[in-house]
Amino acid sequence: MTLNQILRNHQFTRGLADGQIQALAAIASEVTFEENELVLVDGERSKCFFLVAAGSVSVELRTPQYVVSVQAVGPGEAFGWSALLDDHDTLFQVRAREHTTALRLDGKALRAACRQDSQLGVELLQRALGVVAGRVRATELRFAEMCGVRV
């Protein structure tokens, strides 16, 4: 399957115009991660945005004392939203739960594409805000569980 086909069928990018899909395909590359491989490390500069095509990753909160899985992200979903912001650090650690295939979009090139095509920028930022809202909600639920609140 080509990058264009993957992007056209991916839940995050579904419904974008052909030109927008082509612009994203031009800055995307297919990557694979093996089980337990760290994909993103919290506190490091955000450089890439990822669209999961197959497999899954775990979004984790990490401290020196513990690591807590906040959310599992699978096919059709995205992670690495911090890369859409200029000079922003990654807030969550991300680890592959199994063999995973994803599309990696360079954050700098993605931000430039959004500035060049404001319609694409609006679409991607609205969709990314949905990812952020989902992450906040997952974090709230995990925190409530840790505090003994039934959810």
Image (cartoon, rainbow, N blue to C red):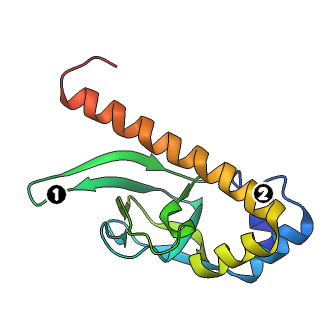
Question: Residue 71's quadrant in the figure?
Answer: top left
SS at circle 1: loop
SS at circle 2: helix
**Residue that mark 2 sits on:** 9
Q: Nearer the viewer, residue 34 or 9?
A: 9
Between tags 1 and 2, which lies in front? Answer: 1
Q: Is residue 135 left or right of residue 139?
A: right
Residue closest to the far top: 150
Residue closest to the far right: 18
Q: Which mark is residue 18?
A: none
Of labels 1 and 2, earlier in sequence is 2
Q: Which quadrant of the rendered structure holds the C terminus?
A: top left
Q: Nearer the viewer, residue 105 or 129?
A: 129
Question: Residue 43's quadrant in the figure?
Answer: bottom left
Q: Which quadrant of the rendered structure holds the N terminus?
A: bottom right
Residue 135 drawn above or below residue 17: above
Q: Provide residue 3's location: percent of width, then percent of height.
A: 75, 74
Characterize the local packing of mark 2: few (<14), some (14-19) or many (20 or more) Cα atoms within 10 angstroms: some
Question: Residue 149's quadrant in the figure?
Answer: top left
Q: Is residue 76 visible?
A: no
**Residue that mark 1 sits on:** 63
Question: Which residue is drawn at the image coordinates 74% and 75% (left, top)?
Answer: 113
Q: Provide residue 106's location: percent of width, then percent of height.
A: 59, 79
Residue 93 drawn above or below residue 146: below
Question: Which residue is drawn at the image coordinates 91% and 67% (left, top)?
Answer: 18
Q: Is residue 65 visible?
A: yes
Q: Provide residue 134's location: percent of width, then percent of height.
A: 50, 40
Characterize the local packing of mark 1: few (<14), some (14-19) or many (20 or more) Cα atoms within 10 angstroms: few
